[in-house]
Amino acid sequence: MPEKIINASYDALVIGGGIAGGEAALNLANNGFKVLIVEKDLSIGGKMILLSKVFPTLDCSACITTPKVSEISRHKDITIFTESEVKYIVKTGEKSFNAQVIRNPRYVITEDCTGCQLCEQACPVIVSDQYQYNLVGRKAAFIPFSIASPRVAAIDIENCTLCGACEKVCPTKCIDFSQEIQEYDLEIKTVVIATGFKLFDPLLIPRYGYGIYKNIITSMQMERQLAPTRPFNTILRPGDGKVPDRIAYVLCTGSRDVTVGNPICSQICCMYSIKQAQLLMGALPMADVTIYYINIRSFGKGFEEFYDQAKGMGVNFVKGKIGKIREKDNGDLIMRYEDINENVVKEAEHDMVVLSVGVLPNTDSASLFTDGELKLDPFSFVFQSDPLASPAKTSIEGVFVAGTATGPMDIPDSILSAGAASSEAMSYLIRK
Amino acid sequence: MAAINPEFGKELNRYGAFDFNACYNCGTCTAVCSLSTEEDSFPREMVRFSVLGMKDEIKSSLKPWLCYYCGECSTNCPQEANPGELMMSLRRWLTTEYDWTKLSGLLYRSLPLTIIGFIIIAIGVLIFSALENFNLQSIMHIGHFFEIIAIASVFGFILLPNIIRMWWLIIMKPRIKVPLMKYITGFGELIVHMFTQKRSLGCDNNQLRWFEHFILVIGYLGLLFTTVFLDWFSNDNLFVIVLGYIMSIIIFIVTIDFMSDRIKKQKEMSKFSQPSDWMFVVWLFLMGLTAFIVRLFIDTGLIEQNIWLYLFHLTILVQWALIIVPFGKWTHFLYRSFAMYFAKIKSQ
């Protein structure tokens, strides 16, 4: 049962607290507008806060994200609802929307939690850690990740045994199992959709054996292994903890592939794979890294040079998509592919395989508005009604879209897109 | 470097091929193909040749015959370019290229012409029967002789010259030197492949289909032998009679299964059926079934009152012998076996 219905009003509702949503919120708030960010996860920062480094500059991703995230969370005109969802939005008039938002219980009083992690130590339940992409475990009472914002504990109620161990050790008595869903009835003037993207699930391609062969991981799992807050403090293959010598990348896993329902290019996989290959060369100087590709799409500023740099460092690029993977008894993997330059089918052995998974639309945005008013494009990204002149406009006047909610793009483009969306939103707000 | 000929795509489409221009050369098809080897990698190369219209390269290639259409390439093709069906279409196209009469091309491309051919033969059989005053004894006698003559002349005038043309395109034109000894030592390969099609066992999960194919070939050759050389319909030897029954039962049971696959379309190879595919399997089925019933009627003494049944069987037989065997899908069986033979003698 909902605790109570709370009424409030904001100038702008930003849906999604990733880098695009955060940037758009910050722009709006810096111009004096009252902003609410609704984030479904336990922390803002989206996917970017979990990445290792960014291409093509190799800057530390967390070092760019965390100052931004802390600026957002301390801003006087920005309110953040984490673990919250927009149920639906109705347009009630010019510069007038009614939004129904629910805030799920975290079972921790956010204001009182000091992030001391005593509850985490006390909790007897271990489940896999979604913020480390299941490479390691976490407790049911946990702080999402070390640079989370807010950096406060949460109770994973689905896995919690209600033993009460966390409650006993909490020095500020902030754990509260009586919390319930809170419903908000909000008056809003404009909406920015920044719901981001989803990653392709390689279980949908059984011939690659992800989920069966232990030494095949996704690129996001490799990203975690390379990040400053990495789980193993080195690169290990999950099957037996061996440091890998021969690492292979499978590009276009779930992109440009009609059979899995995603015919378009994800635009980021070539470059993030090249980036990871360079980082691996630094982390494991003796390792061989091979990238199997259809075409390398290094179209952005500095991308081609970044690609050349990887080749110069000794990354091996092979033209040919991996057809099948099978596992040897020792956990090594045999990849079968056609070497396109030689017209010959070949097999190659690697001891760890990274599937460079593609970008999928986050279709949750379709149900934000009643009556299907928010149009989606043929690939289920948010439809841009005027992609050339006003790329942030959607099919609803006063509703704008930022970042990868419109389609695959990299971080600089997402931030640019967020800038466009916030400008459009502001000009809508001040228009007479 | 050969000139690019985009018109070739349109020509191939008439043999059943799909949108192979969608191919973006990732090589998934070749990599998932369990018959593809380092020496013979396909089907992507064939897709490439087809897109560019490199006819000479296709004509001198054996790769279309090395494919047994398990359909893995089409299932996994990220562009839905359907390489499996392209390989099938190339086999049809090659059949017409080998054929000096060019009749097979006409029949593959035009269903109405094929139907007209079948009707003419049916009328011919009726006229012949009328000339014989519908006398069952003499019709059966001549029908039996017809089989022997048809086999000899189809082979001598059509299939043998076509195989020589195939040999010329594959061995002589590209100037491949093959010592005479290899023609002799490789001959075993031809016989083994003709009777067992053992290469198709290399396809994943193909054991049942291979077995069905195998007993179908045995059944077909067995029935041919029983009717032509042992004169099944006029033979009183119990062993021969039972043998014929078994062979004809095998044929119509296996063909029923193949037809149901083509109707259900669950397997990749059964999804796209051309008229030539249907004719092959339906006529084979009808041959097995009518032969069985004719002999049954002979044994039960009903045949004298049901001469139409024998005429129906004879019509099917003549259509099979004069259209499907020399110009239709039957030739795939022959060319495929020779393709293995040529591949063997070309190698090393």
Image (cartoon, rainbow, N blue to C red):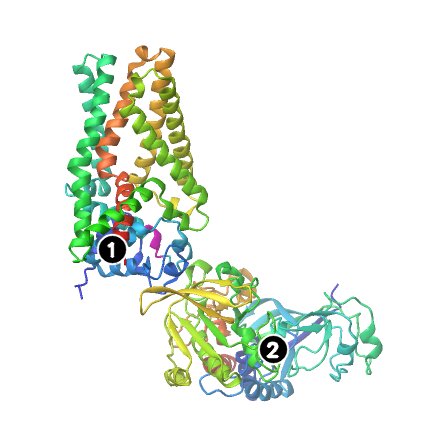
Q: CA distance from mark 2 to mark 1?
A: 71 Å
Q: Is residue B94 left or right of residue A254?
A: left
The residue positioned 54% from the left and 61% from the top of the image is A203
Per the picture, the main secondary structure of the magenta-coloured stretch is helix
**Label 2 crowding class (10 Å Cα cut-off): few <14, some 14-19, many 20+?**
many
**Amino acid type, callout 1:** Lys
Disc 2 element:
strand
Q: Quadrant of residue B109?
A: top left
Q: What amino acid does circle 2 point to?
A: Ile
Q: Position of residue A174 (x, y in %)?
A: 79, 79
**Of circles 2 and 1, which is in front?**
1
Taking the image as drawn, is residue A424 in sight? Answer: no
Q: What residue sits 41% from the left and 42% below the top? A: B210
- Residue named by callout 1: B346
Residue A182: assigned label? none
Q: Return the x and y of residue B129 as percentages of the image width and height.
A: 20, 17
Rendered position, B157 above or below B342: above
- The answer to whether residue A135 is above or below residue B97 is below
Magenta stretch bounds: B81-85
Image quarter (top left, top right, bottom left or bottom right) of the N terminus of chain A: bottom right
Inspect this view and state whether residue B101 appears.
yes
Read off the chain for label 1: B
- Mark 2, residue position: A37
Q: Quick one: SS at disc 1?
A: helix
Left or right: B50 in relation to B248 = left
- Please check the rendered image and state whether residue A93 is part of the magenta-colored stretch, yes or no: no
Residue A315 coordinates in the image, percent (x, y): 42, 80
x then y, percent, for residue B305: 32, 10
The residue drawn where x is 41% and y is 69% is A265
Which picture quadrant has residue A186?
bottom right
Name the subunit of mark 2. Answer: A
